[in-house]
Image (cartoon, rainbow, N blue to C red):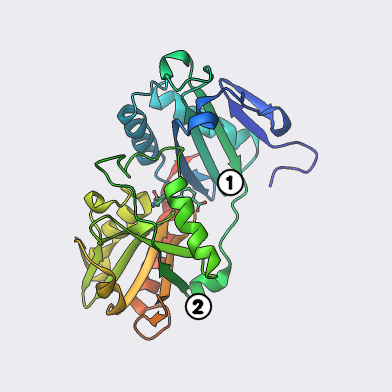
């Protein structure tokens, strides 16, 4: 963490300001309508992991909602690095938020001349170690993933109500994550993580067209698969395929690679984190220590 005496500095619209001063207008359309986009990024050991990929996804999300960030991705990368430096952070979680900006009470985005750009870099709140050593219990919930015909789940938009409703369902039954199905009943993803299962040498995850975010950790795992003798595949599947899998795990920037050992009260595989999942966890952790843009 940054020294106790200096407050956390937040990047806001061109300036680094102390946390207490980092406030947005009640007329900001990010607040009023969830009109905006975001990214969650990690820094490991003084380097920002897959920063270009996160930036590319942010600009794709912005383009999809016709939001002009009014800053080049190269400049925004520099601002992310500056924010990390200002807070003397080497291992961190970075939240990059771009909202439509301040407008009036109507929803017309033409009333918002300037986007609000915020970078929060803080100490990472790691998942408890037992999530990795014991594995997660998850449930399939009744909240379906947004239909891509209404709002593409590939837009990392500020409106996460769909995922939050699913998270509430998981909370209510005392588990950490929820599996969301799409409208057709195929597995899409979890509330803030992608999902995989393993059968033999096949490593399977839903295609993005099923409602899965094009996750950056998901892509890392698919890249690492061949080196561990696994064939990565994108395929539509139902909860049945998960119940009968040998291993299952979730991926996400915050969670990294996290084993799943129970789904809807069914034991997955041996009920312990699978051997292949554990190899992937190690390979992913190695990658995070090796790669990245220096702060
Ligand atoms: N699916 C969804 C819906 C996500 O929001 C992921 C998958 C994983 O993608 P990456 O690129 O991170 O591998 C995400 C991203 C949290 C939190 O606090 C997590 C995300 C977003 C917001 C909050 O756990 N995950």
The residue under the point 56% across, 70% down is 129
The residue under the point 52% across, 17% down is 103
Depth check, front residue: 175 or 70: 175
- Decide if ligand 1 comes within 8 Å of the CB at mark 2: no
Q: Is residue 41 left or right of residue 61?
A: right
Earlier in the chain: of badge 2 and badge 1, it is 1
* Disc 2 to disc 1: CB gap under 8 Å: no
Q: Is residue 21 above or below residue 70?
A: below
Depth check, front residue: 24 or 87: 24
Disc 2: which residue: 134
Q: Is residue 179 left or right of residue 231?
A: right
The residue under the point 31% across, 48% down is 214
In this rendering, which labeled residue sits more in front, label 2 or label 1? 2
The circle on residue 160 is none
**Local crowd size for mark 1, using a 10 Å CA cut-off: few (<14), some (14–19), many (≥20):** many
The residue tagged with tag 1: helix, strand or loop? loop
Residue 232 pos. (x, y %): 22, 63
Work out whether residue 270 can be spotted. Answer: yes
The residue tagged with tag 2: helix, strand or loop? loop
The circle on residue 90 is 1
Depth check, front residue: 158 or 88: 158
Q: Quadrant of residue 14?
A: top right
Work out whether residue 70 can be spotted. Answer: no
The residue under the point 25% across, 59% down is 206
Residue 225 pos. (x, y %): 26, 64
Residue 191 pos. (x, y %): 43, 55
Q: Quadrant of residue 262?
A: bottom left
Residue 98 pos. (x, y %): 47, 29
């Amino acid at each position: 963490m940054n020294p106790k005496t200096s407050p956390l500095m937040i990047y806001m619209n061109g300036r680094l300001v102390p946390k207490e001063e980092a406030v947005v207008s009640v007329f900001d359309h990010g607040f009023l309508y969830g009109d905006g986009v975001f990214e969650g990024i990690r820094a490991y050991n003084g380097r920002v992991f897959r920063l270009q990929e996160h930036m590319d996804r942010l600009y794709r999300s912005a383009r999809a909602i016709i939001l002009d960030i009014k800053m080049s991705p190269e400049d925004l990368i520099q601002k992310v690095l500056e924010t990390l430096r200002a807070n003397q952070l080497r291992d961190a979680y970075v939240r990059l938020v771009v909202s439509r900006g301040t407008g009036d009470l109507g929803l017309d985005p033409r009333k918002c001349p300037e986007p609000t750009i915020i970078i929060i870099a803080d100490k990472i709140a790691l998942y408890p170690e037992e999530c990795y050593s014991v594995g997660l219990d998850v449930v399939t919930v009744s909240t379906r993933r947004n239909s891509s015909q209404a709002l593409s789940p590939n837009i990392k938009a500020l409106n996460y109500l769909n995922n939050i409703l699913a998270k509430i369902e998981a909370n209510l039954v005392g588990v950490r994550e929820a599996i969301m199905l799409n409208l057709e009943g195929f597995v899409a993803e979890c509330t803030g993580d992608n999902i995989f299962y393993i059968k033999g040498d096949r490593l399977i995850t839903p295609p993005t067209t099923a409602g899965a975010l094009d996750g950056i950790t998901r892509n890392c795992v698919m890249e690492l698969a061949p080196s561990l003798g696994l064939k990565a595949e994108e395929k539509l599947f139902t909860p049945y395929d998960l119940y009968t899998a040998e291993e299952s795990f979730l991926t996400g920037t915050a969670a990294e690679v996290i084993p799943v050992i129970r789904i809807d009260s069914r034991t997955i595989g041996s009920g312990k984190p699978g051997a292949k999942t554990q190899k992937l966890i190690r390979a992913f952790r190695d990658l995070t220590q090796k790669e990245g843009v220096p702060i």
